[in-house]
Amino acid sequence: AQTVTQSQPEMSVQEAETVTLSCTYDTSESDYYLFWYKQPPSRQMILVIRQEAYKQQNATENRFSVNFQKAAKSFSLKISDSQLGDAAMYFCAYRSPNNNDMRFGAGTRLTVKP
Amino acid sequence: KAGVTQTPRYLIKTRGQQVTLSCSPISGHRSVSWYQQTPGQGLQFLFEYFSETQRNKGNFPGRFSGRQFSNSRSEMNVSTLELGDSALYLCASSLGGAAGGYTFGSGTRLTVV
């Protein structure tokens, strides 16, 4: 079974600086999809960025980018120019093309200091 | 475009009772998935419905059940509530393929006393 590990329960960053959240996963599949979700205190999970395993190019969405290392099974999220509104729980997730449930990591709580 | 709507937002029930939670997906989305979120266990998959059929199921006891209607709205039912069922229940909708991400609702916070 696929598992997702987020080894950093909490992280903090100074406003306007850069922070990287780590995620590793375990799978025997060659094709799959990876996601980062943000969950602010409002509780709603918001999709931040997604990566398709067959694409070597790292995904980027404005201030959010990923470092996808397929061989190492690593999928880290970099947040540049951190803003107060980035404070939230961040979840890494894996989805197999053959099994439609999404597997989530335990989450990383990000604090942004003004 | 309306988002995923979950009702109610909060619910307090007594042990032994049953509860029904509702989820209306984004228009055009045929897949609805349910997750249970707790501080100790994180996000755990309950089940997924696609075109009124349960397509996938997680490792939860039979007290947890669901269904999907022809308009893609989904309901989740928990019978004989236990204290450990206290959690945030999240509904997520998608078009149905694995490539797309989910769009989540704001969840229903269930407290069992």
Image (tube, grey):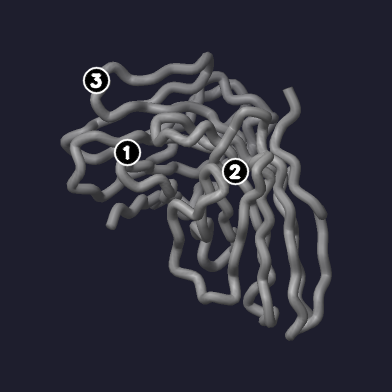
Q: Do labels 1 and 3 share a chain?
A: yes
- x and y percentages locating residue A114 in the rendered image: 69, 30
- x and y percentages locating residue B15 in the rendered image: 75, 84
- Categorize mark 1 by other alpha carbons within 10 Å: few (<14), some (14-19), many (20+): some
Residue for point 44% across, 68% down? B59
Front disc: 1 or 3: 1
Residue picked out by circle 1:
A97
Measure the C-alpha gap from mark 2 to mark 1: 17 Å
Seen from the viewer's position, the closer of residues A11 and B36 is B36
Quadrant in which the N terminus of chain A appears: bottom left
User: Quadrant location of residue B2?
Assistant: top right
Q: Which residue lies furthest to the front in this view?
A: B70
Question: Which tag, 1 or 3, sits closer to the chain's start?
Answer: 3
Which mark, residue A56?
3
Q: Which chain carries label 3?
A: A
Which mark, residue B89?
none
Report helix, strand or loop for mark 1. loop
Residue for point 59% across, 70% down? B64
Apparent side of residue B6 relative to residue A18 in the rendered image (left or right):
right
- Categorize mark 2 by other alpha carbons within 10 Å: few (<14), some (14-19), many (20+): many
Q: Mark 2 lies on which chain?
A: B
Going by the numbered disc 3, the residue's amino acid type is Gln
Residue for point 75% across, 69% down? B19
Residue picked out by circle 2:
B92
Going by the numbered disc 2, the residue's amino acid type is Ala
Measure the C-alpha gap from mark 2 to mark 3: 28 Å
Residue B87 in sight from this viewpoint: yes
Report helix, strand or loop for mark 2. strand
Seen from the viewer's position, the closer of residues B51 and A10 is B51
